[in-house]
């Protein structure tokens, strides 16, 4: 603001790297956020395991909630994985859009959910950037 004495500054290197990676991703270029550090302080320990397992799911890949539960060492805990996805503070970096309900993975229209702004339409758009089609697009975040 004028007169406040504030001046523009470059973001810290970690923030600059995250911004560049996200810009690259949203431009439709293959991207990987595995090396970006994330702060999981205060996160439920099981959810932290789920997020770590999810970060190993690569560009253009999807898993079901049940598959992700098994990868996190807790087969049968698909519902708890869903709770972890709903509480994910870093969507895209911790790519919760890559987690599908079993019916969604089979291609059933209007199956599954997504708690981020724009719901399933936003999930579909994020996956479409990665070459994954989960059905008709509706109004989404972008």
Image: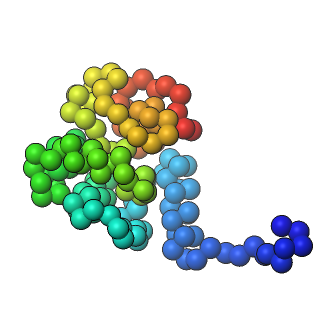
How are the colours assigned in the image? rainbow
Question: Which quadrant: the N terminus?
Answer: bottom right
User: Percent x, y for residue 105?
Assistant: 25, 33
Residue placed most toward the observer, 4 or 67: 4
Q: Is residue 26 above or below residue 47?
A: above
In the picture, measured across the screen, residue 73 lies left or right of residue 90, that is left
Residue placed most toward the observer, 111 or 125: 111
Q: Residue at x 18, y 44 (%)?
A: 78
In the picture, measured across the screen, residue 100 lies left or right of residue 16, that is left
Q: Residue at x 84, y 73 (%)?
A: 4
In the picture, measured across the screen, residue 139 lies left or right of residue 56, that is right
Q: Residue at x 34, y 23 (%)?
A: 110
User: Percent x, y for residue 85?
Assistant: 32, 48
User: Percent x, y for residue 104?
Assistant: 27, 30
Quarter of the image holding residue 66? top left
Q: Is residue 86 above or below residue 51?
A: above
Quarter of the image holding residue 107? top left
Q: Residue at x 17, y 57 (%)?
A: 72
């Amino acid at each position: 603001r004028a007169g406040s004495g504030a001046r523009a500054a470059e973001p810290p290197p970690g923030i600059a790297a995250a911004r560049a990676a996200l810009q690259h991703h949203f431009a439709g270029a293959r991207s990987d956020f595995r090396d970006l550090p994330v702060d999981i302080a205060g996160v439920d320990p099981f959810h932290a395991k789920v997020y770590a397992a999810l970060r190993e799911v690569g560009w253009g890949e999807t898993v079901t909630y049940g598959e992700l539960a098994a990868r996190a060492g807790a087969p049968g805990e698909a519902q708890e994985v869903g709770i972890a996805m709903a509480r994910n503070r870093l969507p895209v970096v911790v790519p919760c859009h890559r987690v599908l309900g079993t019916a969604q993975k089979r291609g059933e229209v209007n199956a599954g959910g997504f708690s981020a702004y724009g719901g399933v339409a936003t999930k579909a758009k994020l996956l479409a950037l990665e070459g994954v089609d989960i059905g008709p697009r509706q109004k989404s975040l972008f």
